[in-house]
Image (spheres, coloured by chain):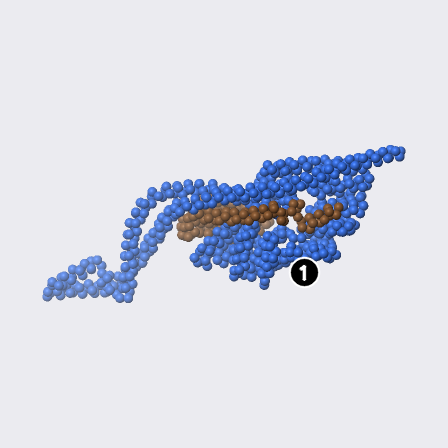
Chain colours: A blue, B brown
């Protein structure tokens, strides 16, 4: 038996333990956010966030400075995982293959190989599944060790290689998680190989397994049911009845087991014992196929016991029940044709409940779901149904975004109306300020250079005050004109000035340097304000420019996607409806056939009861 | 009789529904549709990603953008019922946790609590959380913090720990 659904259920814990996000003290917050949604089963949101984050990381110039840098392998791996869970197998396969081919940790590589194998298995690509499993090597995470082997065994079974599956399953017999399934599948593997006695032995072991786990109880019941059915097929009726009696009366296989137990007893002509399970079954949910068969089988057994009166009563009840059910099925078929089935499926308040499929049955407007539980549980129908629900969800999102475009347009318009008239004046004023700023910056640069030059080559005259510079400037022409005593006076004055400049040089240089440092601070403040202005100015422009084209494109993309989704939903919905209607019609035909038999048998029972009564009266 | 048994056995062994899909036209249609559904999912994800980027650019310019994330310390098992965030004395946001959200936080998920705009410089953050301890006792904890908003987009983290263990119950810092 291959149980992808159970396999997946087992994997949820393994895969969703967001190793990267919890193992490190400070995961990337955006990756952590994606994990937050994933852990709630919101795969679209999880994917959308992680996809954006990974794309942004790839676009970063210096990736080592990005917060996702140390988690990128895990992030890409999780991307594949989320895609897998969102049933995007094509993309998931590509993402996981990329991880496998990248230079990643052995632990991640093995996990990825397992995930890839699972994808192939679900897509029924068994060769590829095995190839992926064969890529596991070295340290395999403990959490998935048994999962890998269980998957391998299932692949072998699906390939029709039961003997290859046997040693793998034997290795899992002691597994905490898979011991029940391993024991059961061992029986199936031997049976598939034609080794009946080994199959019976293993199924018997699985059927006697004791465990308090509900999953183990179900597998135990199933093993007993299969074992009983094999005995029944081989006309070993006593063994069949004994094994079928081991099936729990409350489990999911109880109806089928009760029905088969009745047939086992009937076949060995133990009619009284046949009445017991069929009597129990006939009182159960009447929409169940086994119950409906029991409604017919029970009076048949009474007939064999020559209790024709009671048989006639039960045939009558069966006829009534079949009539009601046939009417219900006809109504259901009509209801589906009117589109009510799909309407009920997409009701959000119902799907918030994890048992929403079961809860569907409580809806008065969806009587059909009583008859569709088997169909609803099948893999292909589930895939189609999930796709339909996903499409409905995507449409809801797209319509909500579509409504947002008008708001964005309005916001951009308001900003444009506000900023556009202001910006020319602001820009004009800024240009004037900008040229003054550049001048001051140049002056500042010159002063800094002069100070630095003075450090290596002192030039006292550079630090002369304005008054001293004026005196020096006047001394030159005076010196050229003066003679004798006047010339001596001018030269003394020049000497005095040179002396003062020399003596005060260090003090003046310190003051110059101190003033320049003060100016540095002022210049830094000015530069910061300048930068702030530039940012604000850019933000003003960015607040309304560059949105029109992408917004128009996105609007068109959204419209196109909605159209495509409508088309896909119609096709998918129609397919689901056809499948459901076919199923219901098959059940109705079956019931009509039962009804014909019941009518015939009812008449026969009345005749026999009357004859019996007449014989009795004649004897008296 | 034997036909019935064989049919039952087959159904039990492979767990198949009454309607068989493998190889039938409806099964092929389902698979073909499945491929197309995967394509449209991919398209819508691309739209969502682009729209989000555009929306972020429009609503939260990079030099003023502030995002506040919430995480729980490892192995915390207290029940966080609600959190409230105030920035500069104004209510920025509050959130009441569902069971699923709390479980996601406990398993290492990080919740984006708030995204908004702040000018560069210092700002006051007040965080208040209420919940229930493992013992069943209600608790309420709050903390005030000063944060500095630079010119780059800012990601702040609020890390929450169980009250009464000696360490800081609410810690705020750059992520």
Task: Name the secondary structure under disc 1.
Answer: helix
Label 1 is found on which chain of the structure? Answer: A
Q: Position of residue B25 (x, y in %)?
A: 61, 46
Work out which residue is located at the far left of the displayed protein and give it: A484
**Residue at 81%, 41% in the rendered image:** A305
In the rendered image, is residue A119 in sight? Answer: yes
Which residue is denoted by mark 1 in the rendering? A167
**Residue at 68%, 37% in the rendered image:** A326
Q: Nearer the viewer, residue A341 or B5?
A: B5
Count of numbered badges drawn on the protein:
1
**Residue at 60%, 43% in the rendered image:** A576
Please identify the quarter of the rendering in which residue A406 is found: top left
**Residue at 71%, 46% in the rendered image:** A256
Say left or right for A211 vs A399. Answer: right
Say left or right for A327 vs A511. Answer: right
Say left or right for A479 vs B70. Answer: left
Q: Nearer the viewer, residue A358 or A612?
A: A612
Quadrant showing the C terminus of chain A: top right
Q: Position of residue A329 (x, y in %)?
A: 66, 38
Q: For mark 1, does the 10 Å Cα neighbourhood hold few (<14), some (14 to 19), or many (20 or more) residues?
A: few
Q: Is residue A392 above or below residue A181?
A: above
Q: Position of residue A475 (x, y in %)?
A: 16, 61
In the rendered image, is residue B161 in sight? Answer: no
């Amino acid at each position: 038996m291959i149980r992808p659904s159970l396999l997946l259920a087992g994997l949820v814990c393994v895969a969703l333990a967001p190793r990267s996000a919890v193992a490190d003290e400070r995961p990337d917050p955006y990756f952590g956010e994606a994990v937050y949604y994933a852990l709630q089963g919101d795969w679209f949101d999880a994917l959308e966030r992680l996809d954006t984050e990974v794309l942004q990381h790839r676009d970063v110039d210096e990736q080592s400075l990005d917060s996702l840098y140390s988690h990128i392998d895990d992030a890409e791996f999780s991307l594949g995982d989320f895609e897998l869970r969102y049933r995007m197998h094509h993309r998931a396969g590509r993402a996981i293959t990329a991880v496998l081919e990248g230079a990643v940790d052995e632990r991640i590589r093995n996990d990825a190989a397992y995930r890839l194998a699972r994808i192939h298995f679900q897509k029924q690509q068994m060769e590829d599944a095995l190839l992926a499993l064969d890529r596991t090597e070295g340290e395999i995470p403990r959490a998935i060790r048994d999962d890998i082997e269980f998957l391998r065994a299932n692949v072998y079974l699906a390939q029709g290689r039961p003997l290859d599956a046997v040693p793998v399953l034997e290795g899992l017999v002691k597994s905490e998680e898979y011991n029940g399934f391993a024991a059961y599948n061992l029986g199936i593997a031997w049976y598939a190989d034609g080794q009946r006695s080994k199959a019976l032995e293993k199924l018997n072991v699985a059927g006697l397994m004791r465990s308090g786990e509900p999953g183990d109880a179900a597998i135990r019941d199933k093993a007993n049911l299969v074992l009983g059915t094999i005995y029944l097929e081989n006309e070993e009726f006593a063994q069949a009845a004994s094994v079928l009696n081991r099936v729990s009366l409350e489990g999911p296989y109880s109806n089928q087991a009760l029905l088969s137990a009745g047939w086992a007893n009937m076949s060995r002509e133990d009619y009284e014992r046949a009445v017991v399970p069929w009597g129990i079954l006939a009182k159960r949910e009447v929409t169940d196929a086994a119950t409906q068969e029991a409604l017919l089988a029970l009076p048949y057994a009474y007939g064999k016991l020559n209790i024709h009166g009671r048989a006639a009563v039960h045939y009558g009840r069966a006829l009534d029940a079949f009539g009601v059910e046939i009417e219900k099925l006809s109504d259901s078929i009509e209801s589906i044709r009117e589109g009510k089935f799909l309407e009920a499926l997409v009701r959000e308040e119902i799907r918030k409940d994890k048992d929403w499929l079961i809860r569907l049955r409580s809806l008065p407007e969806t009587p059909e779901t009583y008859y569709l539980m088997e169909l609803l549980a099948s893999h292909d129908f589930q895939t189609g149904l999930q796709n339909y629900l996903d499409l409905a969800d995507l449409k809801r999102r797209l319509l909500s975004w579509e409504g947002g475009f008008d708001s964005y347009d309005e916001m951009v318009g308001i900003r444009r109306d506000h900023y556009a008239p202001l910006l020319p004046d602001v820009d004009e004023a800024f240009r004037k300020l900008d040229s003054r700023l550049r001048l001051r910056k140049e002056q500042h640069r010159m002063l800094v250079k002069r100070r630095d030059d003075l450090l290596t080559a002192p030039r006292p005259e550079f630090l002369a005050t304005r008054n001293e510079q004026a005196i020096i400037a006047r001394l030159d022409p005076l010196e050229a004109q003066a003679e004798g005593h006047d010339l001596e006076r001018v030269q003394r004055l020049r000497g005095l000035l040179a002396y003062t400049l020399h003596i005060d040089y260090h003090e003046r240089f310190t003051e110059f340097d101190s003033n320049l440092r003060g100016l540095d601070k002022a210049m830094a403040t000015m530069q910061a304000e300048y930068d702030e202005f530039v940012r604000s100015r850019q933000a003003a422009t960015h607040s309304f420019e560059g949105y029109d084209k992408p917004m128009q494109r996105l609007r068109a993309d959204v419209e196109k996607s909605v159209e495509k989704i409508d088309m896909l939903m119609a096709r998918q919905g129609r397919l689901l409806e056809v499948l459901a209607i076919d199923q219901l019609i098959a059940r109705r035909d079956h019931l009509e056939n039962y009804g014909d038999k019941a009518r015939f048998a009812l008449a026969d029972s009345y005749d026999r009861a009357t004859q019996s009564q007449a014989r009795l009266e004649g004897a008296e | 009789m034997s036909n019935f048994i064989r049919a039952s056995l087959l159904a039990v062994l492979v767990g198949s529904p009454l309607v068989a899909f493998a190889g039938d036209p409806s099964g092929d249609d389902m698979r073909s549709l499945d491929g197309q559904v995967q394509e449209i999912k991919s398209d819508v994800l691309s739209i969502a990603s682009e729209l989000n980027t555009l929306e972020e650019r429009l609503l939260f310019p990079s030099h003023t953008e502030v995002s506040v994330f919430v995480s729980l310390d490892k192995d915390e098992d207290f029940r966080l019922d609600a959190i409230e965030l105030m920035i500069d004395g104004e209510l920025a946001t509050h959130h009441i946790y569902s069971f699923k959200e709390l479980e996601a936080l406990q398993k290492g998920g990080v919740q984006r609590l708030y995204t908004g705009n702040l000018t560069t410089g210092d700002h006051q953050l007040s965080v208040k959380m209420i919940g229930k301890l493992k013992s069943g006792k209600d608790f309420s904890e709050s903390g005030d913090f000063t944060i500095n908003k630079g010119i780059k987009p800012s990601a702040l983290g609020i890390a929450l720990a169980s009250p009464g263990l000696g360490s800081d119950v609410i810690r705020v810092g750059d992520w």
